[in-house]
Amino acid sequence: MLEKALSGSRRYWGWVFFLLAVIGAGVIAYLFQYQYGLTITGLSRDVSWGFYIAQFTFLVGVAASAVMLVIPYYLHNYKKFGRIVILGEFLAISAVIMCVLFIFVDLGQPTRVMNVMLHPTPNSVMFWDMIVLIGYLTLNLVIGWTTLGAERKEVAPPAWVKPLIYLSIPWAASIHTVTAFLYAGLPGRHLWLTAIMAARFLSSAFAAGPALLILLALIVRKTSKFDPGKEALQSLAKIVTYAMTINVFFFLLEVFTAFYSNIPGHMHPLKYLFLGLEGHSRLVPWMWSATILAFVGLALLIYPGTRRNESILPIALISVFVSAWIDKGMGLVIGGFVPNPFERVVEYTPTLPELMISLGVYAIGFLVLTVLYKVAIAVKEETEGVEIPH
Amino acid sequence: MSINRRQFLKIAGISTILGIGGTAVVNGLRKGDLEASQMEPNPEGLTAKRWGFVVDMSKFKSEADVKRVIASCHDIHNVPDFGNPKDEVKWIWKDDYEHVFPGQENEYATEEMKGKPFMVFCNHCAYPACVRVCPTKATFKRKDGIVMMDMHRCIGCRFCMAACPFGARSFNFRDPRGTDANGQPFIKHLDPEFPTRTKGVVEKCTGCYERLAKGKMPACVEASNGGIVFGDLEDPNSEVRKLIGKNYTIRRRPELGTQPSIYYIIGGNENA
């Protein structure tokens, strides 16, 4: 099926070569980092994880969100999602690949990465994160490719795929739960030491992931003959609405506990993020932007008139997506390190090479996504109008 | 000599079997022998059930006391000086009461207390969070309580730095064996007795394991003139236990349950 990605319009190839150019710039920046070490990043002794690990964390959520299509389609037989479930599975594949790459570029000794497998350490959450991510990638590759292959031949997918699909549902929850456990089990990092961390991760993932998926589906509809279906996208938008509402609610729970209890350690990171601490306030404008975007997005999504309007819907979805990205892709990781264990404030800003490497990883993800979507859409266009059982 | 595919597969198969079998036979014969990585322990080496430290603040009177102790460690362990706080590597350093014991600050404390230089280094916790999270066992706990680093196994993921509630760990953001813009080496006095590290690995105080093995006290203890006392916390007759028994001592963030092995005698006046 892959050959379908080899023929495309001038615009398709233009996009592919643009991505390749960004990847090239990222590779050059990475070689620079490989040579000189992580000193070229903004990371320090005090903020020892930053942009890379934050992107990893955010993208695990995007990957997990495919389950928001799988559950209605396979468990509730909601047929409208039949046309786009493959888009969710392929988005998951590209997101997991980006996750793995973000971990890789964050390593101080990347050539030793196989030590995680050579010396398996079950008491380390990172060991389990590796297992669930590789498992989830494999599941989605096998499921996506097999079901699409069957669709192309206009037959039902083989029976053995069904158990794998059911397995992928708890597995999706597991990847984000285990990723939350990376943070939630550490003593002495107040922002992270919260029992609802995994729940927050899942709710923000099920808001941001499907929001991105709808936006991608709208792009697909514009650039191809394949129509994902208005009703499917509207149903997905409702999922985004519920998930984002829960996400905001969970966050407010954290705010209540920290400030009503008045425990300094619990208040400090939140104060740093939203008000600034000891004169340091680099993230304050970002966090308030995220807050405003969250409420704008929610208002537009909750009111049916704006949600159903397809020219306003993208604005709502972009608001939700950007809000979740700032929250997890910047605030969560950096806020965990500020103030440091000595209650001193040391700030962090990603450097240009760090951002170039990150863009390169995103470009690799989008290239994988482009190729997979190209294949999927070519198959969909061929089989347009054929009802295939699942 | 040219071989066909069949011959090649035969040779490959036989050598694989010989290889696997051979290793098993050799391993069997070598029972009781020592691995290359093992050595007969030095009979003069210091041993304990759980090594611990007592820091007696009354012995740190001047800046010179602090500097001497830090230098005694950093010099023999080839700790690089990168000259900026962002890339900083440190094994032992000082900070003030308010920042060493956050959550126990006292707004009415005397200026003297606020200004005291508290020596901080790895706590060699009984239940270390860093060891729990390390995905490769590159940081591990020895039977004598020392929390060790294997700098050859560390992949540089820095999970341990996020986990350590004491900020005891440093990362080599750049090559410690290198030189700065003026050609000055980052390691000012290279000590050939101790290994230098590579970029991209985490390091910290390792309790002077290399000195203990030779029967010597940790360097900071030796240099501190009684300011840092070292001994077996499990031995009721050890000097550290006697000091803990006689004085009121505190530890950093004991509420986190890691059981730090550094006890501080704050002192200051008659009632302390």
Image (cartoon, rainbow, N blue to C red):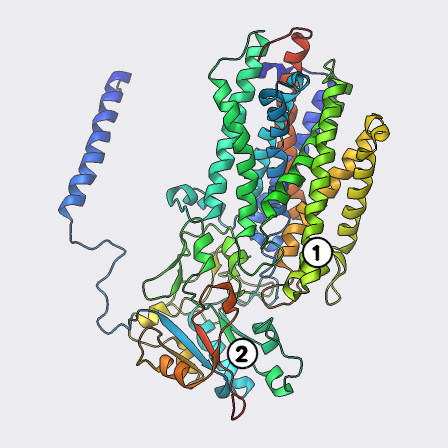
Give amino acid for label 2: Phe
Mark 2 → mark 1, Cα distance in angstroms: 35 Å
Chain letter of the residue beneath label 2 in the structure image:
B
In the picture shown, does residue B270 fall above or below A29? below
- Percent x, y of residue A164: 49, 23
Q: Quadrant of residue B86?
A: bottom right
Chain letter of the residue beneath label 1 in the structure image:
A
Q: How many marks?
A: 2
Residue at the image position 51 percent from the left and 83 percent from the top: B266
Q: Which residue is mark 2?
A: B118
- Percent x, y of residue A88: 63, 26
Residue B175 visible here: no
Query: Would you call the spot at circle 2 few (<14 residues within 10 Å), some (14-19), or many (20 or more)?
Result: many
In the picture shown, does residue B113 fall above or below B122? below
Q: Quadrant of residue B10?
A: top left
Query: Would you call the spot at circle 1 few (<14 residues within 10 Å), some (14-19), or many (20 or more)?
Result: few
**Residue furthest to the left:** B29
In the picture shown, does residue A260 fall above or below A388? below
Helix, strand or loop under label 1: helix
Q: Which residue is mark 1?
A: A256
Helix, strand or loop under label 2: strand
Residue at the image position 50 percent from the left and 27 percent from the top: A167
Give amino acid for label 1: Phe
Q: Quadrant of residue A72?
A: top right
Left or right placement of residue A176 versus residue A280 in this view:
left
